Amino acid sequence: MRSRYFLPLLVVFLFLLDLYVFQGVSAAVSPYSPSVQMGIFIGFWVVALVCWFIVLSIPRWRMAEHVGFRMVLITLMLGIYLGELLAAVFFLIDDLRRGGLWMAALISHGAGEAGGIDLQRSLLLSRLGLLAGAGLLATLIYGFSNKYDYKIRRVSLHFPHLPSSFKGLKIVQLSDIHSGSFDHYQKVKRGVELVLKENADLIFFTGDLVNNHAEEVKDYVQLFSRLRAPLGVYSILGNHDYGDYGSWPTETAKTENLQRLKDLEAEMGWKMLNNAHALVEKDGQQIAVIGVENWSAKARFPKYGDLQKAYAGAGSVPFKILLSHDPSHWDAQVLPEYPDIDLMLAGHTHGMQFGVEIPGFRWSPIQWVYKQWAGLYRQKGQYLYVNRGFGFLGYPGRVGIRPEITVIELV
């Protein structure tokens, strides 16, 4: 019953928001000629009608078809309404101003005088609101062009106890490929070629190869099979890899999907560490690569990981790297219980695919959810690196937070 009325109620809400914003639009264009105003008004309500139609038609979509086009369409619609909400903040400030003037007149001169004051909307605030809303929408549209604009981020880390054979070790970390979102093979190929040019000793993938279904990566198996490193390619599962967000006819179908994903990664030559560790040897010395299934301190994400099981037998190895998809694992379990894990590599957040990163300043809305959300973090002698993601999910773009290939050198 609740889901039956959700979309109609949502359309009612959107209509009320449109109606409120329309008042600001009317004020902003009031200096223009009647014909120009009429054209703007018609355009406004035509766009609103199209958005309402999209909302009501979503249940009839076959989501597996034309995914890229539909995500662009949904993003444009969301951008319009997020822009309207931002504009509405300015209109609300103007309404509070007008209400304050009316109340002051009422208190000072009585109802007769209050009724006679000019309470027209501020042309300045109305136009500032529309400019802010349009700017947000334009930013999201601009972000469509950045989803394959890969950035190589280089990090050098010093560990006094690193075995001498591994000094200068080059690691490439990839995370959050989300192959089900891809819509341009050649651009993904360019990203893979950037990784190959690094000639890394080790390659780590920290989860979310697909959005839900193993078959999403089928067209990219040959491409990702090209990722090779002398000391191996290791991977773990992310929260999306389990198929928890998909629709399955039976639990068996879901289990078979996960096994299919594991088989495909094995076919690509990646060694998946499911609550296990591997000893990497070079010139008679060893480091441990520990991999856990998804483990999150956030209630809405699963805890399939078992670090105790994965760690068992690696305690005597002098240097340890942990692959764990969700960065909240670091504060919740790794730091308090495993002080000898030297480096943890994570992903998951994507930097929300939206934010600002300039020298000396970094911001994204995701930081209100995740304390460690992108880049390098240090607590005493332990390090965490959070990769911003190779792919994208939901919003088919990136604003300010580019897709990432991480190159880590141990010195």
Image (spheres, rainbow, N blue to C red):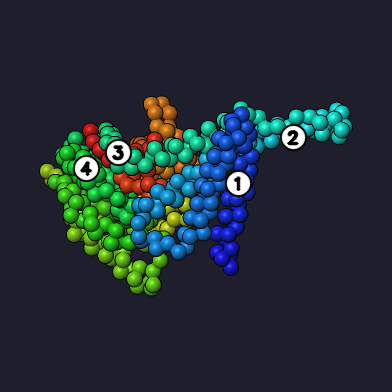
- Give the CA distance from mark 2 to mark 3: 48 Å
Q: SS for tag 1?
A: helix
Mark 4 and mark 1: Cα distance apart in space: 43 Å
Q: Which residue in the structure is indicated by mark 3?
A: 149
In front here: 116 or 390? 116
| In this picture, residue 144 sits left or right of residue 91 | left
Res. 342 in view: no
Residue 308, given in percent of the width and then of the height, sits at 35, 56
Residue 175 percent coordinates (x, y): 31, 47
Numbered label attached to residue 17: 1
Q: Residue at left 41%, top 40%? A: 141
Identify the mark nearer the N-term, 2 or 4: 2
255 or 213: nearer the eye? 213
- How far, Cα to Cα, is label 1 from label 3? 35 Å
- Residue at the image point whose x is 47% and y is 39% from the top: 137
The numbered mark, 1 or 2, whose residue comes first in the sequence reads 1
Q: Pointer 4: what residue?
A: 190
Is mark 4 in CB contact (under 8 Å) with mark 1? no
Three-letter code for the amino acid on which mark 3 is drawn:
Asp
